[in-house]
Image (cartoon, grey):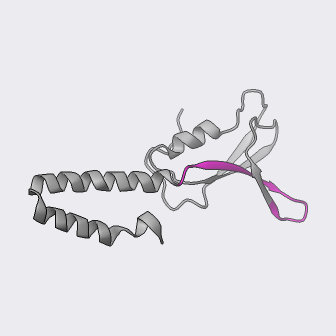
Amino acid sequence: MSGIQDGRRERHVIYATAHLIIPLQQAVFWGVLLSILVHGLVTSSHEARLTQLMPNPDGSVTEGPAPVELAGNAVTVLQVYGNMTFAGPETVESKLPSAKTAEHPVVILRLRAQDTIGSSFHCGA
């Protein structure tokens, strides 16, 4: 791992130093604020995206952009990449293809690359 995610040790040094220099209540406040900001930077750097997986005659799979509209009487396989916490599910939902004009469309939403999925990722009625 690299970049911001490696900063645990540095954050602990900053927190410990802050506890020695400023009053405890302020140090805790700034520590919490810093943690929220760092978490926001880490999660926003992995914006959710959606691609379509299409099988080839030779058995391989080609990845391409997700369609704008679903085809009728067909199966569409969509792969989700990116962070699925906080606003990730809403981003994916906004990028899903429209099924308004399609008759009997089927969508397979593939989440294989996901390490974690937040509690906001659910199917609405």
Most foreground residue, 79 or 45: 45
Q: Position of residue 69 (x, y in %)?
A: 76, 35
Quadrant position of residue 94: top right
Q: In the figure, 122 relative to 79: above or below?
A: above
Q: Position of residue 39 (x, y in %)?
A: 38, 55
Q: In the figure, 100 relative to 74: above or below?
A: above
Q: In which quadrant will I find the C terminus?
A: top right
Q: Residue at x 85, y 65 (%)?
A: 59
Q: Is residue 7 left or right of residue 96?
A: left
Q: In the figure, 118 relative to 15: above or below?
A: above
Most foreground residue, 84 or 43: 43
- Which span of residues is magenta-colored? 46-61
Query: Which residue of the protein is positioned furthest toward the top in this rendering?
Result: 101
Q: Residue at x 48, y 50 (%)?
A: 44
Q: Position of residue 52 (x, y in %)?
A: 74, 50
Query: Which residue of the protein is positioned furthest toward the left in this rendering?
Result: 23
Q: Is residue 68 left or right of residue 96?
A: right
